[in-house]
Image (cartoon, rainbow, N blue to C red):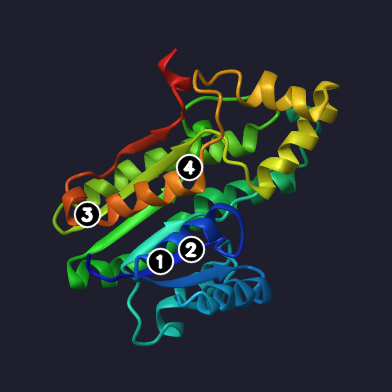
């Protein structure tokens, strides 16, 4: 396998760090990008201690000037693979949803990926290779109550990917979106607690009656599954897979 430089937003924890761990094990160089510079540096150091090739950079994916400056900040390093993973969640009825929080979710999870793609796409096109992998969600496909901003942002990623797939048909650049059902991460742990409060349930009931109930397989998706799918999308065998929605949902959407 050709060794690549992989740029992962929100890479200091959760799904992003899990994918980063898998990538360095495969010999790729990973750039951990996170709004928290200290967390990014700590994550990169942890990967390095495990004999991985990793570096860190601080970036606010909502800041257009910061994102546009990334290629220059990276110097001679060209990003081969962009993984748009940064995300947050806020659970609330729309009537009570703060407008600034709604906008923040859209900025991080939809505007951010567009800005990052805009920044790194020229070099990908110049070298005639690039892989853009959005980390979407089952909520790119279906909806759940009290998550209007998150669902809107994740749905938007699919339209964005389809559009960029059309714009990059003339080169070996692809863009696809991973859409997992629930992955047991700190973000999901927070959702469990919030939904328990919203629905007057225990956390165990939230897991069994809300999160895993729609899934015939009744299992959380593992980070390893996501990393392995991303690895395949990076390969030459996936050069004609673009603009696609890669659903890992334990049969949720088969109903």
Q: Residues within 10 Å of mark 4 (few under 14, many from 20)?
A: many
Q: Are marks 3 and 1 in contact (CB under 8 Å)?
A: no
Q: Residues within 10 Å of mark 3 (few under 14, many from 20)?
A: some
Label number found at residue 168: 3
161 or 212, nearer to the observer:
212
**Residue 137: x %, y % from top left:** 50, 38
Taking 243 as reference, is 210 above or below it?
above
Q: Residues within 10 Å of mark 1 (few under 14, many from 20)?
A: some
Say whether disc 4 or disc 1 marks the residue closer to the N-terminus: 1
Is 83 placed left or right of 163 in the picture? right
**Residue 105: x %, y % from top left:** 63, 47
Q: Are marks 1 and 2 in contact (CB under 8 Å)?
A: yes
Q: Quadrant of residue 4?
A: bottom left
Q: Secondary structure at mark 4?
A: loop
Separation of residues labelled 4 and 1 (CA atoms):
24 Å
Label number found at residue 25: 1
Say whether disc 3 or disc 1 marks the residue closer to the N-terminus: 1
Q: Which dot, 4 or 3, sits closer to the camera?
A: 4
Separation of residues labelled 3 and 1 (CA atoms):
29 Å
Separation of residues labelled 1 and 2 (CA atoms):
6 Å
Taking 190 as reference, is 211 above or below it?
above
**Residue at 45% over, 38% down:** 179
Q: Which dot, 4 or 2, sits closer to the camera?
A: 2
**Residue at 57% over, 71% down:** 59
Residue on which disc 4 sits: 136
Say whether disc 3 or disc 2 marks the residue closer to the N-terminus: 2
Label number found at residue 21: 2
Quarter that holds the N terminus: bottom left
**Residue at 36% over, 51% down:** 230
Q: Secondary structure at mark 3?
A: loop
């Amino acid at each position: 396998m050709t060794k690549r430089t992989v740029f992962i937003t929100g890479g200091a924890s959760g799904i992003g760090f899990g994918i980063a761990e898998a990538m360095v094990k495969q010999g790729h160089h990973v750039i951990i990008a996170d709004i928290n510079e200290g967390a990014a540096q700590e994550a990169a150091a942890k990967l390095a201690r495990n004999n991985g090739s990793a570096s860190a950079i601080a970036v606010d994916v909502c800041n257009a000037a910061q994102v546009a400056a990334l290629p220059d900040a990276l110097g001679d390093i060209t990003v081969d693979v962009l993984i748009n993973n940064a995300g947050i969640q806020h659970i609330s009825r729309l009537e009570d949803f703060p407008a600034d929080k709604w906008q923040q979710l859209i900025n991080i999870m939809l505007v951010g990926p567009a800005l990052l793609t805009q920044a790194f796409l020229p070099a990908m096109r110049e070298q005639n290779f690039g892989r853009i992998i959005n980390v979407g969600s089952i909520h790119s496909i279906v909806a759940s109550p009290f998550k209007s901003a998150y669902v809107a942002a994740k749905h938007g990623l699919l339209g964005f990917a389809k559009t960029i797939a059309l714009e990059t048909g003339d080169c070996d650049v692809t863009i696809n979106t991973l859409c997992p059902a629930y992955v047991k991460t700190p973000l999901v742990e927070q959702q469990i607690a919030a939904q328990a409060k919203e629905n007057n349930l225990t956390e165990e009931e939230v897991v069994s009656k809300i999160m895993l109930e729609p899934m015939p397989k009744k299992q959380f998706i593992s980070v390893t599954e996501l990393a392995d799918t991303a690895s395949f999308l990076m390969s030459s065998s996936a050069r004609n897979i673009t603009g696609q929605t890669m659903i890992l949902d334990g049969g949720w959407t088969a109903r």
